[in-house]
Amino acid sequence: MLHENATLVDVKHEVLLKVAKAAFDGELDQAELRIPYEIIPGPNPTFRCCVYKEREVIRERISLAKNREPLTGAPCHNTVQIIPAACEGCPITRYVVTDNCQKCMVKKCQESCNFGAITMFRDKAHIDPQKCRECGKCHTACPYNAIADLMRPCKKSCPVDAIGMDENMHVRINVYVVAPALKIAHLERFQTVQEW
């Protein structure tokens, strides 16, 4: 069981410890159903909105510990993985217009956007997330600092800039960026992109 001040490292350690013990004892298949309840007994959540989401994150971590894709159960050999249940809470739209927008006459943000993602509404500008490609030109161009950069925490914390979004705004990991950073010798066994 985890305490309320546990970190991500504590969660990973607890899952790997329980999976390793169950595998060593030859009862991993039976323990796989039991481990999420041992780590997150409930009834109150510790880290997320509810115990069900917390247990799902633990289930997906167990799948990864067994070298299986969390959603499909297919064999997985990637060094770095995205846990879908843990990834859902991040802001999808990176750039957002705040109340600082003065709807100025110059409209530098709108002029700077090469994708036509910015339109002017009655009170302020609006960024269409379907058209925005997160280039940041509007953020840089705004003279009132009215466009906030809400970069996803995983992307912001990645030291090798390997985490990005595809055209459908799904998180992806570029293994060709990650692999040299981890000094992996056999790239052919890794997929180019892992996406959800």
Image (spheres, rainbow, N blue to C red):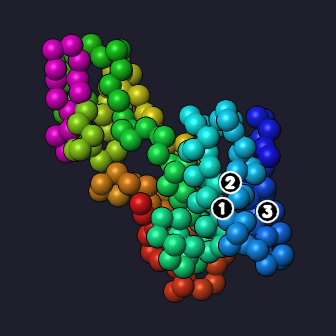
**Disc 1 residue type?**
Leu
- Write the residue at 74% across / 50% down: 39
Judged from the image, the secondary structure of the residue bearing numbered disc 1 is helix
CA separation in Å, label 2 and label 3: 10 Å
Magenta segment: does it hold 30? no
Q: Which of 88 and 112 is in front in this view?
A: 88
Residue bearing mark 1 = 33
The alpha-carbon separation of the residues under discs 3 and 1 comes to 12 Å
Amino acid at the residue labelled 2 = Pro
> Which label is found at residue 36?
2
Could you tell me if residue 150 is visible in this image?
yes
Is the C terminus in the top left, top right, bottom left or bottom right quadrant?
A: bottom left
- Residue at the spot x=53%, y=65% of the render? 70
Mark nearest the camera among 3 and 1 is 1
Q: In this view, does 85 lie to the left or right of 142?
A: right
Of callouts 3 and 1, the N-terminal one:
3
Residue 105 in the image, given as x and y percentages of width and height = 17, 16
In the image, which residues are magenta? 114-126
